Image (cartoon, rainbow, N blue to C red):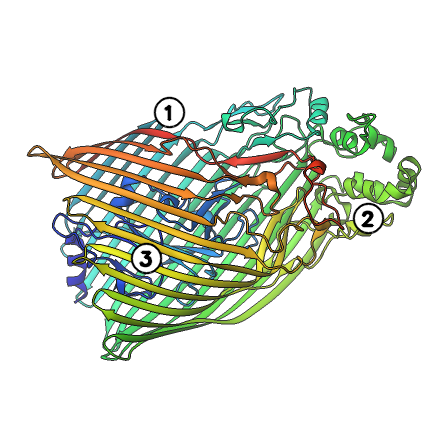
Amino acid sequence: MRFTQVLCGTASAVVLAGLGASSAAQAQTSDVQTVDSIIVTAQKREQNLQDVPVVVTAVGAKLLQDTGVKDIKDLTILTPGLTVTSTSSEASTTARVRGVGTVGDNPGLESSVGVVIDGVYRPRNGVGFGDLGEMERIEVLKGPQGTLFGKNTSAGVINVMTKEPEFGFGANGELTFGNYDAKGAAASVTGPLYEDKLAGRIYVAARKRDGYNDVITGNGPSKRDQDADQNFYTVRGQLLFVPDDRATFRVIADYSRRDENCCGAVQIRTGPTAAILAAVSGQAAPVATTADPFERVAYSNRGAPAKIEDKGVSLQGDIDLPIGSLTSISAIRNWRTDNGQDSDFSTADITYRNKDGSNYSEFTTYTQELRLAGRSEKFDWLVGAFLADERLENRANFYFGNHYEQYLGRLLSRSAANPAGVPNFIALLLNRAPNTSFAAGQGLRDRYDQRATTIALFTNDTWHVTDAFEITAGLRYTAEKKKLDTYQTNTDGGVGCGTALSAAGQARIASIVGAANTGTIIGNLCLPWANALFNGRGTHQERTDKEWSGTIKASYRFSPEVFSYASFARGYKGGGFNLDRTQSSNGLPSGGAGVTPIYDTSFPAEFVDSYELGLKNTLFNRTVLFNISGFYQKFTDFQLNTFLGTSFVVRSIPEVKSKGVDADFLWFTPVRGLTVQSGFTYALTKYGNQPIPNDPGNALALLPGSRMSLAPKYSASGSLTYETPVGDNMKARFNIGAKYSSSYNTGSDLFPPKVQKAFTVVNGRVGIGSADERWTMELWAQNLLNEKYMQVAFNGPLQGSSGLSATQSTYNPSLDTITYDAFLGAPRTYGVTLRSRF
């Protein structure tokens, strides 16, 4: 039985083509142009898409190729309601579904949208940003999926399935050339290795491209004048072993490495602190208030080098037993990212992170999943267990540049009469020689070692009450324990801050600036990276979560063409620890209480209650699919990670609500070879009206009652594919796809200058080749119309103030002096790809 399934799967030419919204795909072969062949595994068993009471977008191999999808960020053009952004590095990639996701810059926070590749849960979204290889399909499941899909999937799952080895020989090759001097090559081979028992597949790829951004480096030390380049390679090998007709085993080993420079930021608005930056650096200040940020000029004297490695091995076994089918998936994975950064994003040498082996995050993860599934006349049942052991090593450095002391001193001493400030002001305040209180190359070097162990038991069962009516119930119990050991140091002992905190230091500061201003001065001299109270501090923290999650679904088929369902799901995402320095900000009295380190950096678990109603329609002789669903989701203790200009803080937002509609449409037109698909999502995702607890300095005052960041109210996608013969021996294929997003704020603090206006991205591809696909030549363009948009905008560190105060909860643009920076979306890229198949 099992062997027959494998051979059938090898011989099949089923291709899924994704739609843009709730549960859309198409099956397309040379002979079959109906909805019937669409198979998904959203409930951990193969089912027809139109029989699944889950909102799914399934994107198949051919459409992935047609639209140039190689990673989860590319996938957004096919999926309304999905937003994927990268910030300080490509490792900090965050996926959001219906406006809900977790900011990825802080490794202590796990993702609200899970990424699963070949059945193996990945610890962070960043692992999905890279060449995913030869893909069979990608399924995007919207809403909480924690019952079946591992851990921390309170907003959704991106489920990637790569192509299995085949028992028939096949080989593919690909060469790509494009603008920005892009070059790429990929090749794969599959076939039998031992009779009809063992088959293999190997895939290798390498891609390289110049950077999108020009970089002004000032006096260096970096001399690299480009940023956002690409340089990586990947290899994936698989073995498929079929010992008999009752069992199959699949071993996958993969390795990927990226050595790139990402991500520099452009200035979208320059504040008055630019004049001080220019004064200390000797470089002309950029005038971004009139310049076009989409000229893609970044300012960085230190650069942003990055090295990312991802590797792992997994073994999946499927065995038919008398009582059901047993599935076991065992995996060991390691993912590491080493980064450097110009942390002030300017040509002045203020602060930086050095890529010297002391600034990295590394995850080593062991996972084991066991499932036993069976069925009877009235019941489909599944029980399982999931085990995970995740070890995180996070090392952080953050150093003073050559201009830090002079810049901070001028910043603290400036006035209307002297806007450039006083040179050597800090030396005067602390009675020390200039540039010795915050000496260049000194700063923090912290280490965080976290171990998370997870044990979960789950079941998902369907009762076929009648031929038309079904009830599905799922339940999961998760026990998770996290232990964190932290050790924090200042390489110079925090001498500048320590001097300011001493009795003599406070008295001297008060004599110069007055007692009323002493606390403010001390607070700025003792910012987290300079705070002497952190030096030599070691802590141990533990937390345990034991929670139930689950779902109940009822479905009714009115006719062979119309399927309806209603569902409720309770989702859960574990709590954790903030892996950054945090300190009290409740005022800064002369005693220095406002710079006291916060020892408890934990935050609680996140929960969501989700309700959905859906109607799936298969019309006109099964050539048209039209699905629509409505949803309402309420999150409690939503984990918000936000950068305040000096550190990342995590706040548990009491309430977040998301409600809206997903719709999709697929039409296999009467014109042979022409397929149209489109999708639409309306999602109103807002914070509750409750004040944000423990809001430092009222920095999050704009959140209550507002729409969340990176949460467009409307998004829509469409794709048109046409394939036609050309003469007797050739064929042509055309595809154009587009994604529209309405306006949204890109900053987690919702400051108005960070709003991205509505935009549309269009991709196109034209191919011609032999009818048997022995060779194909494709001309393609990503972001064909060169749409200009921001991924994320943020406050320039130590470069101005929004004007919000502890008593002010409305934004006054006249008081906003911040320099705003942004990570931009990719510009237009185009090129040619040559493919061959043997």
Q: Nearer the viewer, mark 3 or mark 2?
A: 3
> How many numbered dots are placed on residues in this image?
3
Residue 38 sits above or below residue 218 on the image: below
Say which amino acid is labelled 1: Asp
Give the CA distance from mark 1 to mark 3: 38 Å
Residue 252 position in % (x across, y down): 32, 53
Q: Which residue is mark 3?
A: 23
Say which amino acid is labelled 3: Ser
**Front in this rendered view, residue 671 or 398:** 671
Q: Nearer the viewer, mark 1 or mark 3?
A: 3
Q: Earlier in the sequence, mark 1 or mark 2?
A: 1
Q: Which mark is residue 181?
A: 1
SS type, badge 2: loop
Residue 369 position in % (x across, y down): 38, 65
Say which amino acid is labelled 2: Leu
SS type, badge 3: loop
Residue 464 sits above or below residue 210 on the image: below
Query: In the rendered view of the protein, which quadrant contains the C terminus?
Result: top left
Give the CA distance from mark 3 to mark 2: 54 Å
Q: Which residue is mark 2?
A: 588
How many residues crowd mark 1 within 10 Å: few (<14), some (14–19), many (20+)? few
**Front in this rendered view, residue 357 or 602:** 602
- In the figure, is residue 372 to the left or right of 497? left
SS type, badge 1: loop
How many residues crowd mark 3 within 10 Å: few (<14), some (14–19), many (20+)? many
How many residues crowd mark 2 within 10 Å: few (<14), some (14–19), many (20+)? many
Residue 807 position in % (x across, y down): 76, 50
